[in-house]
Image: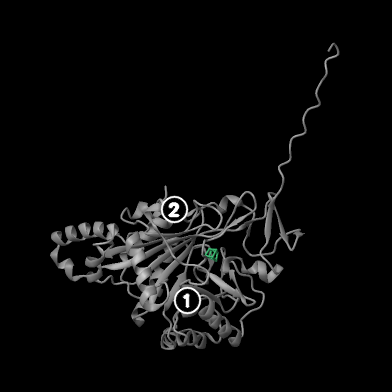
Amino acid sequence: MRPPKRAMYRMPWSLNDNPIGWLEITDKCNIYCRGCYRRNLTGHKPLEQIKDEIRFFKEWRNCDNISIAGGEPLIHPDILEIVAFVRELGMKPLILTNGVRLTDDRPFLRELKKAGVFGFTLHIDSEQQRPHWKGKSEQDLLELRLSYARMIHQEGGLHCSIGATIYPANLGDVPMLVRWAGEHADLIQGMIFIAFRGAPQDAAFDYYTGGRRLEAIDVSYTVEDTSEIGITSADIYEKIKEACPEYEPGAYLGGSQTHDAVKWLLAARLVGKGNRVYGSLGPKAMELVQIFHHLFQGTYMGYTSLWRFPKIAFLALGAFDRGIRQAHVAYWRDIRRSPLRALQPVYAQSLAIIQAPDLLPDGRQDMCDSCPDMTVWNGTLVHSCRMDEWRLYGSYLMAQPHPVEEATPEPETVSANR
Ligand code: SF4
């Protein structure tokens, strides 16, 4: 089960007009995450190179925000200057971090805020090798997620999303994570679920670069067990629905090769205190947000700090959007039951699903159409999830399926009396 594309808005993002730029400032990290796309080859990038890449995004990508990533960006010695430079160029610096560097370091968080950080996406899941948290379940890790969310919230005015890679082993935990996020909609603006992907290292494919066949590939995202990489956005969608029937994505990005893949599935649900979910923004509201942001700010919108959904917008957008109209019905029913709730805020909490590249049976790679996470490599834009192919081999790898060996036909027996 998955939402039909025709019922959603296709985000208008493109290569040269995309709200997000993916800036990698280091390939070093302080923990190990199983789903990581990056190998530690060159360490921290020099500040001048990073500034050039930020200027590049400004010139060629028209970004609203810069996702500062790695490796682990918070261990880069110039992180404060990098954040400040992104702000100086009029973009929102959002840090994608495992959070380890922030643990018990409130002064550092304050310095980041002073430098102009827009917020954080904290990547936390049970397949990471975190100090003091090894072998913990998704349920156990809620405590850690909450402690970071609280700390960020207490600083005030900062965006906080929580991300997790989804494997077959933790797919069943998605409903629990969604319920938990709803209970903390006052602290957490979004959840991001990334379906685990990897390049199969089985006998089915050969990999080529520059016409040369490689004996083996050395990128970090190879997998032996291909049964692990089959989770789709539809699988995660179903799991979210289990926890939250009111959840309905309003926008998507498709695949670059196939017409029916859904690579990014984007929802904003409207949540009252105590996980009372009223509904989700529908496609018209999603479209209006993008159009008005572009009209008045000059860029499309990737992230917002406005997560207390303004009641005035709630009323006004209902005229255009069926998702909000449905939410109105649930909201007013709730207020009739308990009138004091009218004084409480309604939060817009985003739920995003990302289904990264799929290797198709004929060897093509189905990427996210209008990939929002393109990064700069050698003065050009490349998909960040496959940048290590450029770093190691100088191009994207081409996969070729092995020809299916035809069974040798049995020699025909000729009867002697024919
Ligand atoms: S294609 Fe782009 S958006 Fe999709 S997973 Fe790769 S880098 Fe991310």
Taking the image as shown, residue 200 lies to the left or right of residue 259, namely right
Query: Tag 1's secondary structure?
Result: loop
- Residue 375: x and y, percent? 57, 73
Residue type highlighted by circle 2: Gly
Q: Tell me: 230 left or right of 340.
A: right
Residue 8 locus on image (x, y percent):
38, 56
- First of labels 1, 2 by sequence position: 1
Q: CA distance from mark 1 to mark 2?
A: 35 Å
Can residue 94 be seen here? The reply is yes
Total number of numbered discs in the rendering: 2
Q: Are marks 1 and 2 in contact (CB under 8 Å)?
A: no
User: Label 1 belongs to which residue?
Assistant: 63
Q: Position of residue 66 (x, y in %)?
A: 48, 77
Horizontal relation, residue 232 to residue 181: left or right: right
The disc labelled 1 sits on which kind of residue? Cys
Q: Which residue is mark 2?
A: 172
